[in-house]
Image (cartoon, rainbow, N blue to C red):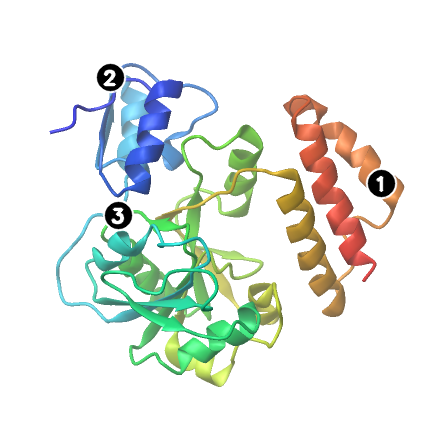
Amino acid sequence: MTRPLTTLDSRSIGLLDEALRFGAPLDLRLEGPLPAPLEAPEVAPLFRSARSTDPSTDAALQRWSAPAARWAPGPAVTAVLPASRGRPIGIGALRGQDVPVRVLVLANGRHGPQRVDGAEVRVVPWRGHGTTRQAAVAEVETPYVLFTVDDAVVLGAGCIRRMIETLESTGADAVVARQVPWPSADRVTRERLRAWTPARPGPRDVSQVDHVCALYRTRTLRDSPLPDVPIAEDLAWSRSRRVVLAPDAPVLHSHARRVRALWARERATHAQRRRLGMSSTVPSLGGALVQALGAVRHGPREVPRHLAELLGQWWGGRA
């Protein structure tokens, strides 16, 4: 049996990263409060059990622990995820939910797995994020469909049940999970995810659905299909629809901030925003350069990353 972690130093965080990637649960028995910049809502769900000798930290860890299983009858869900990075890392967590989950992996034949144990793999021609995902809805026979990605992991055996409960109790069109960064994520990534899907009690309306982890009623997607767009299909679909965040349904997901990838993603996303008639978030090249200088407070390494994002947004907004 693996011994609990007692600290969250760089070595322990490296061990936790590896354990989460391979689906090996760990326990935390922290001596004292959490070290900065970590916070309880993003640490507690990562462990099978998390406790601290500091009373206030311990209470926060208990409050934000991953939702446990109930093992009572529940409605079935089809989880649909495109795969371009080899074997998706979250298959085990999806199949370990306390509601029945059928996993449908979409592979385009050139990239992604041809076979994944515990999941159905459908080799499909990739026709953009919106069209390809919507085509998969025709294969869904369950009352709910969950769109996710191949590098995300739902946390806690009751995660999807919580999303279903939030969808039905609020009457929303879609529900999104709260995104928790990888333990080794940088400070900027943590701050952005805290702002994007905040850890505050109770469901709350958010601006758009996010296919990192989003739950729909299947009939909703049949009546109101995803648009035929190459990227940002979740943003396009969300217009004039109600989307709710389920803060007690955490999903592990974040990306390393690499300059080229940041530029490409922001350029493509903001070009799509422009096609939808939305205004540019970075209207001028000079504004992008000035905003990039503000990243100095996060350290010199963050400046080129921030500049890549802003230039991508500016260039995409000109499309």
Considering only order in the chain, which callout, 3 or 1, is on the residue closer to the N terminus?
Answer: 3
Choose mark 2 or mark 3, whichever is in front. 3
Say which of 286 and 122 sits in front.
122
Taking the view exactly as shown, the residue that stands out farthest to the top is: 32
* Residue 64 is at least partly visible in this image: no
Say which of 162 and 259 sits in front.
259
Say which residue appears at 42% left-offset and 49% top-offset: 178
Which residue is tagged 2?
53
Quadrant that contains the N terminus = top left
Say which residue appears at 71% left-offset and 54% top-offset: 267
Residue 8 lies, in percent from the top left, at: 35, 21
Mark 1 and mark 3 in contact? Answer it, CB < 8 Å.
no
Q: Label 1 neighbourhood size at 10 Å, few (<14), some (14-19), many (20+)?
A: few
Considering only order in the chain, which callout, 2 or 1, is on the residue closer to the N terminus?
Answer: 2
Q: Is residue 219 left or right of residue 288?
A: left
Mark 1 and mark 2 in contact? Answer it, CB < 8 Å.
no
Circle 3 SS class? loop
Q: Label 3 neighbourhood size at 10 Å, few (<14), some (14-19), many (20+)?
A: many
Q: CA distance from mark 2 to mark 3?
A: 23 Å
Q: Label 2 neighbourhood size at 10 Å, few (<14), some (14-19), many (20+)?
A: few
Q: Is residue 223 left or right of residue 165?
A: right
Q: CA distance from mark 1 to mark 2?
A: 47 Å
Taking the view exactly as shown, the residue that stands out farthest to the front is: 110
Residue 233: name its quadrant: bottom right
Residue 177 lies, in percent from the top left, at: 41, 54
Which residue is tagged 1?
287
Considering only order in the chain, which callout, 3 or 2, is on the residue closer to the N terminus?
Answer: 2
Question: Residue 198, relative to residue 241: is it above or below?
Answer: above
What amino acid is found at the position of numbered circle 2 in the picture? Thr
